[in-house]
Image (spheres, grey):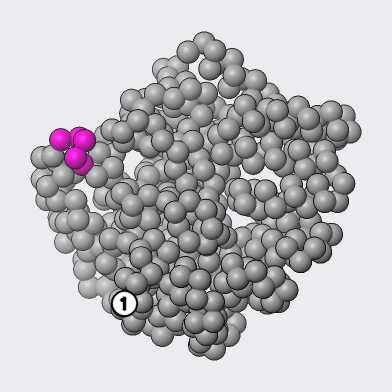
Amino acid sequence: MWNSGAFHRGSSLSSMGAIVLTLAMLLAQPARAIELLRDADVEYGLAQLASPILRAAGLSPAQVKVLVVNDGDLNAFVVSNDVIFVNHGLINRATSAEMLQAVLAHEAAHIANGHITRRMTNLGNARTLAGLGMALAAVAAAAGNGDAAAGLAIGTTSAAQRAFLKHTRAEESSADQSGVRFMRAAGADPRGFLEVMELFRGQDVLSEARQDPYARSHPLSRDRLRAMEAFVAAYGTGVAPNPTAAYWFARVKGKISAHTRAPKWTLKRTGDSGYKDVAFLREAVAESRQSRTKQALRAIDNAIATRPSDPFFHAAKGDILMDARQFQSAVTAYGQAVKLSPRDALLLAGYGRALLATGNVTAARTTLEQARVIDFRDGIMLRDLSVAYAKSGQTGMAALVTAERYALSGRMEDAGIHAKRASGLLATGSGPWQRAQDVLIASERAEKRKKRR
C-alpha cells in the first residue's frame, strides 16, 4: 500500500505496504491474495481523471473511488457500486489519458447501468453468494461497502467468482455505448475506447488460460469491436486534448511505473512524460529505491520547487526521509503536506507514522485516529494506530484495531482472537465494544462455514 507520497516497504515493491485482500481473482490460477496499492498522489490523480466521467454517468465522484491493485496483469473490475479497481499493469500499458479514462468510463457504466446491483440481487436469489467467499467480502469491505460485505458469505470457489465478475455480451455492449456517451459528455476523446480494444485485439481466439484477465471478464468479439467503432463515429471524435487530464495521467503512470519497474529502467526514462516535476518525482523514487537518499532528496526538492503548494511532493519527501530513518525531518515534511491537504487520510496516516517514530505518541494517536475516521481501508495506518494505543496503555483499543486490521485482510481467525480480547477489555456496550462484537460475529460465521466445507 503506497501511503502518502511514496510507498511503504512491503512485498517486493520499494517503499510500499499493502492491504492484502483475500480475493481469489477471477483467474484460471488457484485462489491467491491480492494487494491494494494505496497512495494519496496516485489516488488524487485517478480522481482527477475519473471525476468528469463519473459526473457524466450520474455518479458522485465523492462516492466512487478508483483504487489500484498490485497486479501486473491487464485488468479492471467492479464488485460494488462505490469503487473501481484497476491493476497497475493496465495503467502501465495505457498510452494516453483518454485510454485510461475509457477503462474507467466502461466500469462506471457497469455501475450506472445497474449491472452490479442486479448481479448481487440475482446471486442472492440463487443462493450462490457463498461461492463468492470472504474474498469478495474483503474487497467490498475495503471499498467501504458494508452492506455488500455483510451479504457476501464466507468460503471461496474461483468458478463462482469468475461467474460474478464476468459480464454478459449484452452488458458489455450496454457499457460500451454508455461509456462512449460519458466520455463525450465529459469532454474526453472517445477514441480512447478503440485504443483499449486494440490492446486486447485477438484475445477472443486464445484459450481462457492464455487470455488477459480483462478479456476473460469483458468478452471482446469482432462484432463488439465493429459496434464500438460505430459508437465512436456516431458520437464524434473532434475533442480537443485536455491538458489537465494529460498531466495527471502522466503523473499517475510515471509514479506507478517508477515503483513497479527497475530503478535503472526508470532513471533512463525520467523525462518521458514531458513534465519537469513528474521527471523529478520519478528520479526521486528511483534513487530512494536504491537507498541513495541524498540524490532522492535533491530530486524531490526540485519537484517541490516546481510546485511548492503540492502536498503530495512534500509527502513524498517525508517517505524518503522515513526510509532513511530521519524521523524528525520526516515529521516536518509530512506536516507541510497535511497543512496543504488536511483531510487526506493517507497523508494523515504518513504524518502519524512519522510522529510515532519520533516518540510523540499522543500526537501520533490523535492524527492516526483522524485518518481512520476518514478512511479505514489503510492497513498500515491500522497497524500504527494499534501501536500508538498500546504505547498509550489503551490495550483494549489496540486489540480492537488489530482485529479490524486482520478482518480487512481476510485473516478472520486472527481477527476473532483479537476481537475476543478487545471485548474483555473494553466497556460493555460502548462504541468500540460494539465494533469488537461485529468482528467477532464475522469471525465466528467464517469459522462455521469453514467447518461445513
Q: Position of residue 397 (x, y in %)?
A: 80, 42
Magenta residues, as a range? 207-211
In front of the other: 42 or 396: 396
Q: Is residue 208 magenta?
A: yes
Q: Is residue 427 left or right of residue 54?
A: right
In the rendered view, would you say 303 is above or below 91?
below
In the rendered view, would you say 156 is above or below 343?
above
Magenta span: chief secondary structure: helix
In the rendered view, would you say 54 is above or below 389?
below
Q: Is residue 107 visible?
A: no
Query: Which residue is at 58% across, 85% downward?
Result: 308
Q: Residue furthest front?
A: 291
The amino acid sitting under disc 1 is: Arg
Q: Is residue 145 magenta?
A: no
Query: Which residue is at 31% across, 49% downward?
Result: 73
Query: Which residue is at 38% across, 56% downward?
Result: 88
Q: Position of residue 185 (x, y in %)?
A: 35, 63
Q: Position of residue 430 (x, y in %)?
A: 85, 35
In front of the other: 384 or 293: 293
Q: Is residue 384 visible?
A: yes
Q: Position of residue 30 (x, y in %)?
A: 35, 30
In the rendered view, would you say 100 is above or below 336?
above
In front of the other: 345 or 263: 263
Query: Which residue is at 14% across, 51% downward?
Result: 201
Q: Secondary structure at mark 1?
A: loop
- How many numbered callouts? 1
Q: Is residue 206 left or right of residue 52?
A: left
Residue that carries the numbered disc 1 in the rendered image:
269
Q: Residue furthest top?
A: 452
Q: Is residue 324 left or right of residue 27?
A: right
| Badge 1 density bin: few <14, some 14–19, many ≥20, Cα 10 Å | some
